[in-house]
Amino acid sequence: MKKFNWGTGITIVIILFLIISIGQVLVIHYLVDYDLVVEEYYEEEIKYQDQIDKLERTKNLPEQLQIKLVNKVIEFTFPSIFESESITGAINFYKPSDDLLDKVQTIKLNKENKTFTDTKQLTTGLWRVKVEWNVDTIKYYNEESFMVP
């Protein structure tokens, strides 16, 4: 019987390490779904082009949507070139650090084309506001980031 020495021990440790490493790679490869391609690529491309069109249309307006944080209230002032009754849509409050805190608010304007949101319903930190709004059948889109104190 051959004596067990340090060279044999190192060889066994290296072989075990390689087996475990290869096993982890194989398990992760088969269990993790990391597809980057969308099944309906053409439809997604059309949606993306619609988003680009909304952004371009919004940028070309003579008056822009104003989003301001004033005394713990977020004030949304829509362009006065439109009547308040013709503006519809939704305001999405997106919290990058925790998607469970995301909120959606429908747009309800007063006569001055303004709507308000109290920051008490939002936690402190960075928020992104995504406003998708329509005037009759024409769609617009604004996005802005701000900090809630």
Image (cartoon, grey):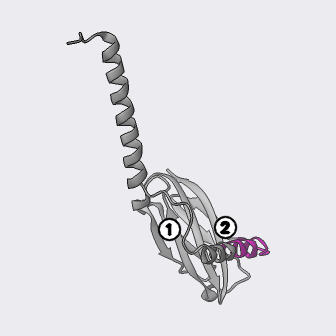
User: Is 130 on the left-hand or right-hand side of 123?
Assistant: right
> Would residue 67 be counted in the magenta stretch?
no
Percent across and percent down for residue 41 are 60, 72
Percent across and percent down for residue 38 are 55, 68
Judged from the image, the secondary structure of the residue bearing numbered disc 2 is strand
User: Is 137 on the left-hand or right-hand side of 101?
Assistant: right
Residue at point 60% right, 88% down? 85
Residue at point 40% right, 54% down? 30
Q: Amino acid at mark 1?
A: Thr
**Neighbour tally class for label 2: few under 14, some 14-19, many 20 plus, Cα within 10 Å:** few
> Would residue 61 be counted in the magenta stretch?
yes
**Residue 82, picture quadrant:** bottom right
Q: Which numbered tag is attached to residue 66?
A: 2
Nearer to me, 60 or 62: 60
Q: How many marks?
A: 2
Nearer to me, 123 or 115: 123
Q: Earlier in the sequence, mark 1 or mark 2?
A: 2
User: Is 21 on the left-hand or right-hand side of 111?
Assistant: left
Q: Is residue 7 above or below residue 85?
A: above
Q: Is residue 75 above or below residue 14?
A: below
- Disc 1 + disc 2, Cβ < 8 Å: no
Q: Which residues are magenta?
A: 51-64
Q: Amino acid at mark 2?
A: Gln
User: Is 85 on the left-hand or right-hand side of 15?
Assistant: right
**Residue 89, picture quadrant:** bottom right
- Which residue, as the protein is rendered here, is positioned at the far left? 1
Nearer to me, 24 or 126: 24
Q: What residue sits right under mark 1 in the picture? A: 117
Name the main secondary structure of what is drawn in magenta: helix
